[in-house]
């Protein structure tokens, strides 16, 4: 809501100040989404920079058809896809980074258990096919509606619902398989 004025502005704003505000408000979301798309911290850094350069250059082109957050995530998605399709990325294999959850908990035992569970879930989510992973992350992590995701991804709402359902089932199935193998409790 705080950036609704952008859809009415055609010029005259201090773009540097607006960019600073957008980076403060959504910089972490943009970086996280870039990381989830690429699995690489260094690429997420580069993509985030590229996203905000594009936003700076096209700030007056924001039409307000979606929220600013959805607009930024769409730019992030498209930029990440372009980077992943580039010839350089296809030829060079980098070692993937591990997701590191940073949380504070009252006891060391609780912290260790929670960290292991979080790592297990993220490992499963990050192994999903890109189309399933992105709808799951957009829904759960970023809280986008079905319509916002459909607009952002350029697919129908039914396709988003189907992908989200398949993603959740895949995660639950994998976590249940892992529980059976390790003798733990089922997740579902």
Image: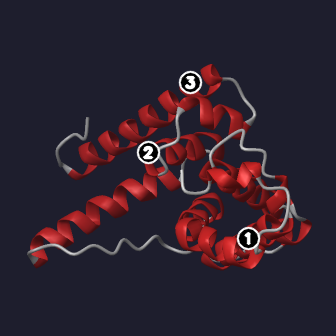
94 versus 59 height, above or below: below
Distance Cα–Cα, label 3 vs label 2: 15 Å
Q: Specify the color scheme.
A: secondary structure
Report if residue 98 is visible in the image.
yes
Taking 100 as reference, is 15 left or right?
right
Horizontal and vertical percent for residue 124? 44, 52
Q: Give the number of the disc on residue 52.
A: 1
Name the residue nearer the viewer: 134 or 87: 134
Per the image, the residue denoted by label 2 is 140
Taking 168 as reference, is 58 left or right?
right
Horizontal and vertical percent for residue 19? 69, 72
Per the image, the residue denoted by label 3 is 162
Element under label 3?
helix
Label 2 close to label 1 by CB (< 8 Å): no
Q: Which quadrant would the C terminus be assigned to in this image?
A: top left
Identify the residue at horizontal 27%, vertical 68% (top origin). 115
Horizontal and vertical percent for residue 110? 12, 68
Identify the residue at horizontal 85%, vertical 62% (top origin). 11
Taking 23 as reference, is 53 left or right?
right
22 versus 170 height, above or below: below
Residue lying farthest to the top in this orientation: 158
Q: Give the number of the disc on residue 183.
A: none
Identify the residue at horizontal 78%, vertical 45% (top origin). 63
Report if residue 40 is visible in the image.
no
Distance Cα–Cα, label 2 vs label 1: 24 Å
Of marks 3 and 1, the one in the foreground = 1
Taking 65 as reference, is 145 left or right?
left
Element under label 2?
helix
Counting residues from the N terminus, which is met first, the one under dot 3 or under dot 1?
Answer: 1
Mark 3, Cα crowd under 10 Å, few <14 / some 14-19 / many 20+, is few
109 versus 5 height, above or below: below
């Amino acid at each position: 809501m705080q950036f609704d004025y952008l859809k009415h502005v055609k010029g005259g704003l201090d773009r540097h100040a607006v960019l600073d505000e957008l980076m403060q408000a959504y910089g972490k979301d943009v970086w996280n989404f870039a990381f989830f798309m690429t699995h690489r911290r260094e690429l997420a850094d580069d993509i985030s920079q590229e996203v905000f350069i594009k936003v700076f250059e096209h700030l007056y082109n924001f039409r307000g058809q979606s929220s600013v957050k959805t607009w930024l995530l769409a730019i992030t998605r498209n930029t990440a896809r372009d980077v992943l399709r580039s010839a350089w990325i296809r030829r060079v294999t980098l070692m993937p980074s591990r997701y590191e959850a940073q949380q504070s908990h009252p006891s060391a035992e609780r912290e260790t258990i929670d960290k292991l569970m979080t790592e297990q879930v993220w490992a499963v989510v990050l192994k999903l096919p890109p189309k399933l992973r992105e709808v799951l992350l957009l829904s759960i992590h970023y809280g986008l509606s079905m319509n916002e995701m459909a607009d952002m991804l350029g697919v129908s709402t039914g396709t988003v619902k189907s992908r989200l359902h398949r993603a959740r089932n895949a995660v639950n199935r994998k976590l249940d398989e892992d529980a059976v193998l390790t003798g733990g409790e089922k997740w579902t």
